[in-house]
Amino acid sequence: MSFVCEVFPPDADALSPVCPSAISSRDENVLFEIFRPDVALAIWLRPQPAKWKAGLGTLLQQVPFGAIGRGTPEDALDQIVQELPVPAPAALLSDMLLLGRFFATITEQSEIRASLAGVNDDSCRRFHCDSVRLRLLCTYHGPGTQFTMCGPQCRAPHQMPACAVALVKGSAHPAALGNACLHRSPPVSHLPENRRGRLLFCIDEPGFLP
């Protein structure tokens, strides 16, 4: 059963209540709620995948970096693996493939565009809507993506927990009705250098490539 709830970032105080146009649940089926016209963001508050952190330190030492893959979920993952600066943990790659297959199923697409980025700056710090129909976001390490339903000048945004899976409705979705999700990368430049690194996994539909 899905429900509207408050979303808490790791080790932080509660934020303001989540607006009805953002829905979250510990049930993965909440992601299908994104097809409701009144829902701009669906978040699966899942537990962290087992053993995925093992060996992650070497990859985080290479931040910043970016790796992109296109095609079937399997092909996209193979291309990401080839572009990574160092090998990624097998458990992390397995979870990325799982999310790629899930996204392909929910969008009824045989191909996807996926990227794994190591980020340590404020490059996407402004609230914005994506020019896509749907986008999947998962922050494996570091502060999660921030979002708001209160406009681009929001001073108290919500923040997704680590490893939560979010489906973001973009401005190109036919059911957006002006309610595409405003989100941004969390500002990290004020943090100590050893806490700025983020590992962000992103999946788009192939017909909406940047």
Image: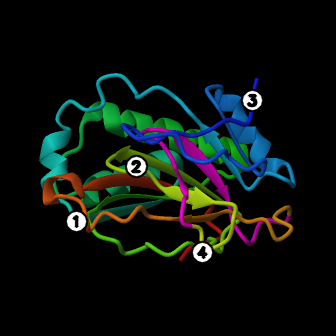
How packed is label 2: few (under 14 Cα within 10 Å), some, or many (20 or more)? Answer: many
Q: Secondary structure at mark 1?
A: loop
Cβ atoms under marks 3 and 1 closer than 8 Å: no
In the displayed structure, 70 sits above or below 13; it is below
Q: Earlier in the sequence, mark 3 or mark 2?
A: 3
Residue at image coords 53%, 45%: 100
Q: Secondary structure at mark 4?
A: loop
Q: Left or right? Give the position of 28 relative to 8.
A: right
Q: Quadrant of residue 40?
A: bottom right
Q: Earlier in the sequence, mark 1 or mark 4?
A: 1
Q: Earlier in the sequence, mark 2 or mark 1?
A: 1
Q: Please tell me the numbered disc located at residue 77.
A: 2
Q: Please tell me the numbered disc located at residue 153.
A: 4
Q: Earlier in the sequence, mark 4 or mark 3?
A: 3
The magenta region covers 155-174
Q: Secondary structure at mark 3?
A: loop
| Colour convention | rainbow
Q: Amino acid at mark 3?
A: Ser
Residue at image coords 58%, 47%: 166
Q: Amino acid at mark 2?
A: Leu
Residue mark closest to the camera, 4 vs 2: 4
User: Rounded to the nearest whole Å, what is the CA distance between mark 3 and mark 2?
Assistant: 30 Å
| Pointer 1 residue | 64
| Pointer 3 residue | 2
